[in-house]
Amino acid sequence: MNKKNIIIAPSILTADFTNLGSTIKELENIGADYIHLDIMDGVFVPPITFGAKVAKDIKQITELPLDAHLMVKNPQNHIESFANAGCSIISIHLEDNIHVHRILMSIKSYGVKAGIVINPHTAVSAIEPIIDYVDHILIMSVNPGYGGQEFIESTYKKIKDARDLIEKNNKNIHLAVDGGVNSKNIKRIIESGADFLIAGSAIVDAPNKQDAIDMLRNY
Ligand code: DX5
Ligand code: ZN
C-alpha cells in the first residue's frame, strides 16, 4: 500500500467541545483527510454526543469532508439531516438494524457514500449479502461508545477478511478501521488491508497534533 493512499480521519470524540472550531481548523492545517464524527444517542451506545446541527456547523468552517459514524437506534430517522448537513460518508451499523439495505439506499439517494460498520462480535461475512450496496466498510476495533480504548487484536484477521471480500467482489471502496488506532499498531493495520484510519485520542489528545498525525502517516 502506497503511504500516500492512506486516509487519516481524526475523530473529535475526545476533543474539548468548547474549542471545537479551533480544533477542526488545526486538524485541517496539519493534514487530516476527513473529520470523523461519532454520533451517539445514549441508546445504541451509552453516551450521547451531538447531532446534525453540530455536523452542519462544522461543515461551514472546514473544507474537509465529513465522515459520520451513526451509533444510534433507528438510523433511518437521521439520514436526511446528516446528508443535508453536508456529510460525505454516512455509516450505519449492521447490528440491531433490520432495514440495512433500505437505509443504505436512502443514504445513496442523497449522493452520499453509504458505509456499513460492524462491531467486534460481527463476522465480516455478514457484509457479503449487501456488498453491492455498500460504498465504504468500517471495521470497529473496539466496542463502540468511548474514545481511548485498546485496539482488539482479533481485528487484524477481520481486516484481512474484509480486504478479501472487497477484492473478491472487485469493489473500489475504502476499508476503514476505528478504535484504538495509534502509531504502534498502524503498520500492522495497514498491512492487514485497511486504507482509511480513524484515530481519535492518538491525535486529538496528543501534546502535539502535528507530530501525532505525522507519526501515523510515516508508520
Ligand atoms: C468509538 C468511536 C471511535 C473512537 C475513536 O465508539 O467510534 O471513533 O472514538 O477514538 P480512539 O482512536 O481514541 O479509539
Ligand atoms: Zn467512530
Image: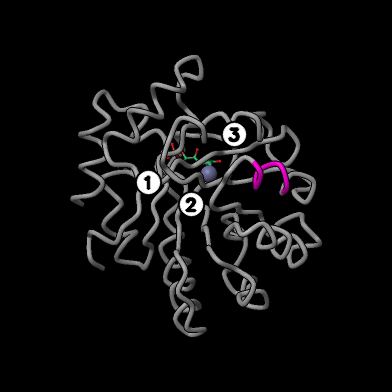
Give the mark nearest the N terminus, 3 or 1. Answer: 3
Display colour scheme = one colour
Label 3 SS: helix
| Residue count near mark 2 (Cα–Cα under 10 Å), binned few <14, some 14–19, many ≥20 | many
Q: Amino acid at mark 1?
A: Val
User: Tag 1: Cα neighbours inside 10 Å, few (<14), some, or many (≥20)?
Assistant: many
For badge 3, the amino acid type reads Lys
* Residue found at x 53% / y 63%: 137
Up/down of 203 relative to 74, above or below: above
Whole-Å distance between the Cαs marked 3 and 1? 27 Å
Q: Earlier in the sequence, mark 2 or mark 3?
A: 3
Number of residues whose C-alpha sits closer than 10 Å to that of mark 3, classed few (under 14), some (14–19) or many (20 or more)? some
Q: Position of residue 59 (x, y in %)?
A: 52, 36
Asked if 48 appears above or below 130 in the picture, the reply is above
Beta carbon of the mark 2 residue lies under 8 A of ligand 1: yes
Residue at the disc numbered 1 = 181
Q: Earlier in the sequence, mark 2 or mark 1?
A: 2
- Boundaries of the magenta span: 80-84
* Residue that label 3 marks: 56
**In the rendering, at what x and y percent does residue 118 appear?**
60, 58
User: Is 59 inside the magenta-drawn segment?
Assistant: no
Q: What residue would you read off at disc 2?
A: 141
* Contact check, label 2 and label 1, Cβ < 8 Å: yes
Q: Residue at x 26, y 35 (%)?
A: 30
What's the residue type where badge 2 is placed? Ser
